[in-house]
Image (cartoon, rainbow, N blue to C red):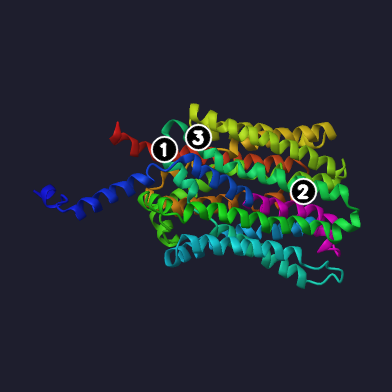
Amino acid sequence: MSSISHAPHTAADVAEHDARRQHQASHAPVAPNEIAVGVVIGRASEYFDFFTYGIASVLVFPSVFFPFLNQLDGILLAFTIFSFAFIARPFGTTIFMAIQRNFGRSTKLTASLFLLGTATVCIAFLPVNKSGGYGVIVILGLLRFLQGIALGGSWDGLPSLLALNAPKNRRGWFAMLGQLGAPIGFLIAGSLFLFLNTQLSREDFLDWGWRYPFFVAFAINVVALFARLRLVVTEEYTQALEESLLEPIGTLEMVHAQGYNLFIGAFAALASYALFHLVTVFPLSWIAISRSQDINNVLIVQIIGALVAILATVASGVIADRIGRRNTLGTMAVLIGLFAIATPFLLNGGRFAQDAFLVLGFALLGLSYGQAAGTVTANFEKRFRYTGAALTTDFAWLVGAAFAPLVALGLSQRFGLVAVSAYLLSGVVCTLLALRINRSLEAPRAKPAQ
């Protein structure tokens, strides 16, 4: 009876009914490859900002902003400010989720990327701290904190939408696409700093050359903004996000409902996130202080390492689709543990051994980081996945990566490189425990379906 009462009777009703069906068909299914393009562009722009600041923390900031400190203390202070962005990210996510609920997704994304670009380019305008005062340092710290707020707010939900629309037998492949932004971002940032550092005199580089990458970061953010808005503001993708229940849930509600998933997710990829800085930012600082080889040679090897990491990230998608994302992450954690044990021998073993450390480290980073996102966030209920994925990423960066270069450099200078091994091994243990707990929590949920 109800079916008769809802059937279209007039020509207008038939037209409206057909239009509705046509509209529904026009946006479903969402093409994963099209989403992937937006994800890769968006993440690559964010990582370029990320690595521009990280590389400058070693090559530039100690001389430009902290001239009253020796090289070691200057780098340690730069790494301290480096961590501010990761501390700010969860707050940025919370603030901009509220903006999205009140003003929409496009407003949130535009505001966050405008803030990110503005904070980044403002760093380029900071004067050289010739007087040794603290005013410039305070402003640098504030701008770095604002970068973190903006990065937290730049979450667009596209990785979650990509995960929900990926074919079941290719979820590992599509999960790694967003992670490609990391090695691509480092490749561009490292190449730009290498070019400037080799083509300019030391005086010109420290006076104005280092500022250029921060200007480039602003331009890249503008391009990334339009590439992402092209997707997220269209009716097709808006409806796809809404139908997938990818909603900006409040942080307190999220923590109250599924806080355990945030905790497990932050630790499940800890080994990968800790390794992230121990093969990118930390080696630059350690080799710069030890003067065991020319810093430009280190950048060249790291650029080669970034290319290796791109290939390894792609390989992680193939491997994960064969043995599972969780198994891939666990296996890579064990290999990272072995790499941690070898770290003192490699970094203390001369130029060839140091280069091997970098290339092997980047390879492991690609294989592990390629599946670091989505392995545990898939456990969130659909309506919590949008906010849950964002906050899990924020806390994973905070716990695993925020203080890694600071702690690694400080420990290595005081206790030797064996302390760096212990630090990385602790991340491996946390990853394996978190994955084991996650599996035990999934078991009860799986029984009724069997």
Q: Crowdedness of circle 3 by 10 Å Cα count: few (<14), some, many (20+)?
A: many
The magenta segment is 46-74
* Amino acid found under the numbered disc labelled 3: Gly
Residue sticking out furthest to the left: 1
Q: Which corner quadrant of the image does residue 293 belong to?
A: top right
Q: Quadrant of residue 357?
A: top right
Looking at the rendered structure, the secondary structure element under dot 2 is helix
Direction from residue 389 to residue 356 in the image, left or right: right
> At 67% from the left edge and 54% from the top edge, which residue is drawn?
49
Nearer the observer: mark 1 or 2; the answer is 2
Residue labelled with disc 1: 440
Give the residue number, with chain letter if any, for mark 3.
Answer: 172
Q: CA distance from mark 1 to mark 2?
A: 46 Å
| Amino acid type assigned to the residue bearing label 2 in the image | Leu
Residue 192's disc number: 2
The kind of residue tagged 1 is Ser
List x then y, in percent, for residue 321.
Answer: 49, 30
